[in-house]
Structures are given as structure tokens and as C-alpha cells.
Amino acid sequence: MLFVMPLIYSSYQIQVGALSASLKKEGHEVEYSEFLLGERFDKVSQGALLKTLKIFSPDIICFSSYDFNFGRINEISSFVKSKTDTPIIVGGYYASLSPDEVISYPAIDMVCVGEGEKPLSELLFRMKSRNDISGIENLYVKIGNKIYKNRVGRLIEDLDSLPFIDRNIIDYQKLIGNLLDRNEIYLNMMVSRGCPYNCSYCSNHAFKRLYPNPDRYVRYRSPQNVIKEIEECAKQYKFNKIAFQDDMFVASFNWFTDFAKEYRRKFSYPFRCNIRPESAKMETLELLKEMGCETVEMGIESGDERIRREVLRRNITDGMIINAVQNIKACGLRLKTYNMVGIPHETISSLVKTIKMNFKIAPFEVQTMIYYPLKGTDLGERSFKEGWINISKIKKYTSMARGSILRHKNIPHFIIILAKWLNSATALRSGNLNLIKQFFKIFFCGNFLILKRAR
């Protein structure tokens, strides 16, 4: 199988690493190629892909999709089909929540809905043995003019049964050692799958509805399994910190306390993780600090309590946020906040409240994104139905940082952009002057790459 990933920037894709590891465990060969969305899929890129196709000669080509890269996936898959009849399958977020749309494109033969380990394994087994592939769970399969839409199977409940993610599909050491601050080399880790919350703008509630066992949506690997993976990574790679990238690292307090014991006994790597205001209790935070946690990352999203409650479906009061921040700082932890601007029904007053909230709590890091209506999410679908979307802008932006695709009814576009930068700048109040250094690195590196491409 050849995985092809159109990306905003070069980064390790955990979902592809998980699928690759599962396929390799069963004896299949895997190759990986990526293409950057900021660059055209021109003759040079086409030539590179054709060379890979010739050398590797895949039996099937797989894309992992999300809203921003699906246009490029359609472009690349159409090019591939003009050169070869190799079957093409698309999985990932966008395909899972818009399978009828994705399978309708002529170059796409199959769509994987939901977790891919089981259906891809069954697909390759049947292809190898030349058996019928039309009835595989989780797959939409196009054969001739007929499309077979199979039901979604059960979630994988025992995550320990899966192999550790495959970091060898790329030069992982080069990637993690080539970040802005080379004093911080982070190992990316996932200890769980799923999130217990149902925020309207996030895909988790939509994914949860796909499965016949949604009560098992949030699953954790055993502490021993996670420890073993870290030990194996320490033998292969040089890193000095860990980034736990789970939606909610401490969703299960019982699991967390067990893991904390094992982690403290084995490692001293500083780390960062995601939490929610509801989970920022002193007992949890003190244990995180004892384990070596440096930074907790927490979603504020909007400083307007009404927007959080009525639009984003986050029943978190201002008081809960303030209390969580006080606890975080009392434990000596750094705070990174996640925020959005340009949310439907938001007003200029709402934007000001978000900036005020971050200025008041003074996070060490602030990440502010511009709201994007993800297909299949409740707020995304509502945004399309209520006429908030400027269709002509959908293909214009390739990330949530560039601009809004909303035809916003309350806020001019330039105000949304201004609010994004003002909100992110509130981190300077914490004394984190490293942000200025990072800005200049991004600015000058970005312009250097533009000039280089121009030549």
C-alpha cells in the first residue's frame, strides 16, 4: 500500500503511522509520500509521484483526508488514474463523515469510514486471495456503476492489541529535531482514542455516532503498554520531552493515577498534555507536576460564556476557567490556551471578551485559530444550512490560520483577522518573549522559502 498525504506542512501523521504498523505486522509492504498544499501539484511533483509508483508498484493507494486537503486529494487521484488503474481508497476524517460525496468522485474507488485497521487488513487479504471485496465492513466500494455501502463495524476496544505506531515511514528523527526550538525535541505519543465530550464544532460527536458501540468510544492503552513504547522509542530516537497528543489526557482519573505511578518509576522526561477546565483539580494537577509535566493545554475557545454554551456546546462558565487557571498556576505549571475567532453568531463584543479573558489569565502560550465549519459536525452542518458559508472561499484557504470562509453576519473579515493576532499576543503578558523570536523565525523562513520557489 502506498499512503499519499497532502499536508499544510511536513509533519508526522499518527493515523497513518497506526495503519502502517498494523499492515506491516501482517506482512504487507508500505510506502509513504507527502505533498505540501502550499505548493502546486506541478510537473515536478507529478514526476516524483510517478517515480514512486514505478519503483514501489503499489497494489492500492490510500489517502487520509480532512477538509483542507480533499481538493488536492481529488487532483492527485485524478492524475494517478490517468496513468494507472491502481485502486484508490480514501479514509480519514473527511471521508468518514462525507462518504457519499467522496465516493462520487470518478477516480476514487473506495472509502473507509471510521477506524481503518480492520477494514484495510480485510481488504488486502481479499485482494491478495482474489476474493470479492464488496462486503467489507466500514468500506464503501465502487465496482462498475454500483456502489456497495457497508455498515460500520465495532470500535477496536483493546488498544493493546495494536502494534506501536510506525515512525519509520518518514525520517522521524530529522522531523522532530528540526523544529523552531531545538532545545525541545518532543516525542509524539497517543495513549488513548476518543473524547468524552460533545462540542458542536469538533468531530468527536460525529464519529461517535458512526459506531454500534459508542459507549466504548473513549479507550485507553494500558500504562504498561505506553511505557514499553516510550522505552522502545528511547532506543531509536533522541528526544528530551514528550507531547501527549490525546484529546483528553486525564479523562479517566483511575487510568491516569495508574499511569502516573509507572511513568514516575521509569522516566524523567518533561511533557505536555491536554486537559479541560473541569479536570483542572488540584489533585490532578499536583500529580501531573510530580510526573514532570511542564505545560497543560486547555481550550478556552471563546471568552463569551453565551457563545461557549449556546453555539459551541461547552457548558463551562467563566468562573470555572478562572478557577482552573488559578489551580494550574498554583501548581507551577505553564498554560497554553486554544481559542477560536469568527465563530457563527459571534459579535465584536464576543471577540473582545476572548481577548480580555486571555489577557486576564495570561497564558504562557496562546493559539488562536479562525473557525472553520468541519463537514459532518453539528455546528459545521448548521453553518451550511443557515447560509454562513462563502462557498467561493472554501478552496482559497488551506488551514484554520489563514482566513474565514464564513460570510459573517456580525463581524467584518478584517476584524476577525485582527482579533486573531491580538488574542495570540496576550501571551506576551506572561513574559514569554520567546514568542517574538519564533515569529521572526517563521516570518524570515517563510519569506526565504517564497524567494527560493520564485527563483
Image (cartoon, rainbow, N blue to C red):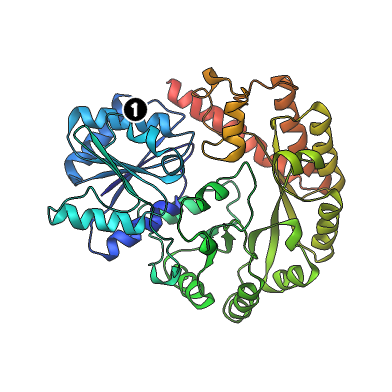
Q: Nearer the viewer, residue 161 or 156?
A: 156
Assess disc 1: are there few (<14), some (14-19) or many (≥20) residues with their C-alpha within 10 Å of its C-alpha: few
Total count of labels: 1
Asked whether 305 or 132 is in front, the reply is: 132
Query: The disc labelled 1 sits on which kind of residue?
Result: Glu
User: Horizontal placement of 315 versus 194: left or right?
Assistant: right
What x and y, as percent, mark residue 386? 63, 25
Residue 190 at least partly seen = no
Give x and y (percent) for residue 328: 79, 61
Q: Position of residue 86 (x, y in %)?
A: 19, 39
Observer-nearest of 7 and 126:
126
Q: Judge whether 83 appears above or below 212 on screen.
A: above
Identity of the residue drawn at 22% across and 31% down: 81
Task: State which quadrant residue 399 falls in.
Answer: top right
Determine which quarter of the picture holds residue 76: top left
**Where does label 1 land, which residue?**
75
Would residue 436 be found to the left or right of residue 68 on screen?
right
Q: Quadrant of residue 369?
A: top right
Q: Is residue 368 visible?
A: yes
Q: Residue furthest left?
A: 130
Left or right for 344, reference 230: right
Quarter of the image where the C terminus is located: top left
SS class of the residue under badge 1? helix
- Residue at (60, 69) in percent of width and height: 269
Q: Residue at x 19, y 47 (%)?
A: 59
Q: Does 360 sit left or right of 245 as displayed?
A: right
Q: Nearer the viewer, residue 181 or 37?
A: 37
Residue 119 drawn at (x, y percent)? 31, 55
